Structures are given as structure tokens and as C-alpha cells.
Amino acid sequence: MKNRLLFILLVIVLFNLYFWPKTNEEEKEVFIYPEKYTITLMGEVVFPGSYYFFEPVAFMDVINYAGGFTANANLNTLNLNETLLKSTIIVVDKIVDTNEDSYPKTININTASFDELIKIDGITENRAANIILHREQYGLFKNINELINVKYIGEATFEKIKDYLTV
């Protein structure tokens, strides 16, 4: 009986060794991660920051991920068709206004609106309102020197603003 039991046990062990799945270290799957590209956008884009890609990407696609350009972006210096093949930092510049004087140098005080008057250095909101009130009550100004009659405009203020006003 002992021999039989020993024989059965031996058959079971050999059976398990033969049919049991073998673990082989070489059969394990190795996953290779692709190279990561970091594209950093700064300047005139809606959402500046760093964006990560795992394959070469077109510059316009990166801009689309960043929400597009702002209204002040200078597109003349950029190659929108460029393919970015490595980690890059891109700065989108602002449009440079070559015309510094977008407003006329002098403003006619007889026709100027409240918004135009307060843009002049030295004229506050109260002074602009008083210029308009004075113009409505007493009629149009005949010359610039009549501004001294306006409430809150004295000699010092008049000297500061007289170069920006005309009749």
C-alpha cells in the first residue's frame, strides 16, 4: 500500500511538472515609452505654459492647444507650418505700435467729449465735467485763455494743459 501511495504521489508530481505553465523571464513584456517633447509657450497666447507631446507636432497644433493667439500677437515673425521635433521654448511677441500718437496732439475744447478730455494729462473727471458744463452754460470758448474761468482750473493747471487744447 505504501508503494502504491508513493507511486501515485510521484505520478502527480511529475504530471504537475510536465503540464504546469512555465514562467520564463524572457517572455515578460517590456514596454518602451516614446520620447517626451516639452513645448513651452510664452507671450501673446491665450493659455501660456508647458505642453507635453510624445511625437513631433506642428506649431499650429500647439497654438490650438494653447487656445490660440491673443489680439496683440505679432504673427509676422512666426512660422506657423514649422514641425517641432524637440523640446522648445517659443515666445510670441506683441505687436509693436509704430504710431505713438494715435490721438491728435491737440483737442478742440468746443467739440471734445468727456472721454477725450479726461485722456489729457492734468484734466481730471471733475475738470472735464466742468469744462463741458461751462461750455453749455456760457457758449463756446472763444480762446483757450477762457479756461481759467472754469471751476477747478487755475493758473498751474492751465499751464499744464494748454499745449494739448485748441479752439
Image: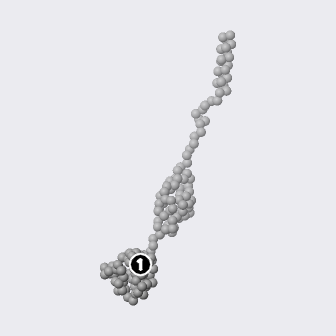
Is residue 82 visible in the rendered image? The answer is no
Nearer to us in this view, 84 or 116: 116
- Location of mark 1 (residue): 129
Q: Position of residue 143 (x, y in %)?
A: 38, 88
Please, what is the three-letter code of the amino acid marked with disc 1?
Answer: Ala
Q: Residue furthest front?
A: 137
Q: Position of residue 85 (x, y in %)?
A: 53, 56
Badge 1 density bin: few <14, some 14–19, many ≥20, Cα 10 Å:
some
Q: Say which residue appears at 51% left-offset and 65% top-offset.
A: 70
Nearer to us in this view, 10 or 106: 106
Looking at the image, residue 162 lies above or below residue 96: below
Q: Say which residue appears at 50% left-offset and 67% top-offset.
A: 73
Q: Say which residue appears at 49% left-offset and 59% top-offset.
A: 48
Q: Residue furthest left?
A: 156
Nearer to us in this view, 129 or 54: 129
Question: Relative to residue 11, is residue 146 drawn left or right?
Answer: left
Q: Secondary structure at mark 1?
A: helix
Quadrant of the rendering where the C terminus is positioned: bottom left
Question: Relative to residue 6, is residue 42 drawn left or right?
Answer: left
Q: Position of residue 77 (x, y in %)?
A: 49, 67
Quadrant of the rendering where the N terminus is positioned: top right
Q: Position of residue 27 (x, y in %)?
A: 61, 36
Corner quadrant of residue 137:
bottom left
Q: Say which residue appears at 45% left-offset and 73% top-offset.
A: 97
Q: Residue furthest bottom?
A: 142
